[in-house]
Image (cartoon, rainbow, N blue to C red):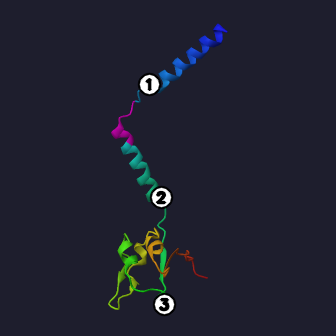
Amino acid sequence: MAENTESSKQRKTKASQAVQEPTTAKPQELEASEVATSEAEEREKPKRFFDIAIFLGWCKGCGICAAFCPRECIAMGEDGYPAVKDSDRCTGCGFCEIHCPDFAISVRARKKVSSHED
């Protein structure tokens, strides 16, 4: 019984020592390496494009979609209705689609176009 108690104490001591051992990297270095990794991963990903469809028959022209678009892809036209200004800037976040009270907007990933001709 004494052996079990002693080995249990030894395990607890080893575990606490492992937790308390300092790391060799400084917090700034860790953050910089994490940022560098995420930037490298971001560069490797191909840019995805999205299509924005506005169903004007359902739209009441409230402008919520244009107000919520973080990339300013949608702008209110002179007629008082939203229009897609630049769909290539769209990140596909869907804020416009989510916040539209009339469900008059849709954001979908653009299908890839074949790069070779037949």
Dot 2 surroundings within 10 Å: few (below 14), some, or many (20 or more)?
few
* Residue, disc 3: 57
Q: Nearer the viewer, mark 2 or mark 3?
A: 3
Q: How far separated are the C-alphas under marks 1 and 2?
A: 37 Å
Amino acid found under the numbered disc labelled 2: Glu
Q: Position of residue 48 (x, y in %)?
A: 49, 68
In terms of secondary structure, where does tag 3 sit?
Answer: loop
Q: Amino acid at mark 3?
A: Gly
Element carrying mark 1? helix
- Residue at 37 percent of width and 80 percent of height: 63
Q: Magenta stretch? A: 24-30
Q: Position of residue 90 (x, y in %)?
A: 43, 72
For disc 2, the marked residue is: 44
- Asked where in the image residue 84 lies, by quadrant, the reply is bottom left
Q: Tell me the residue that label 1 is attached to.
A: 20
Q: Earlier in the sequence, mark 1 or mark 2?
A: 1
Q: Mark 1 against mark 2, which lies toward the viewer?
A: 1
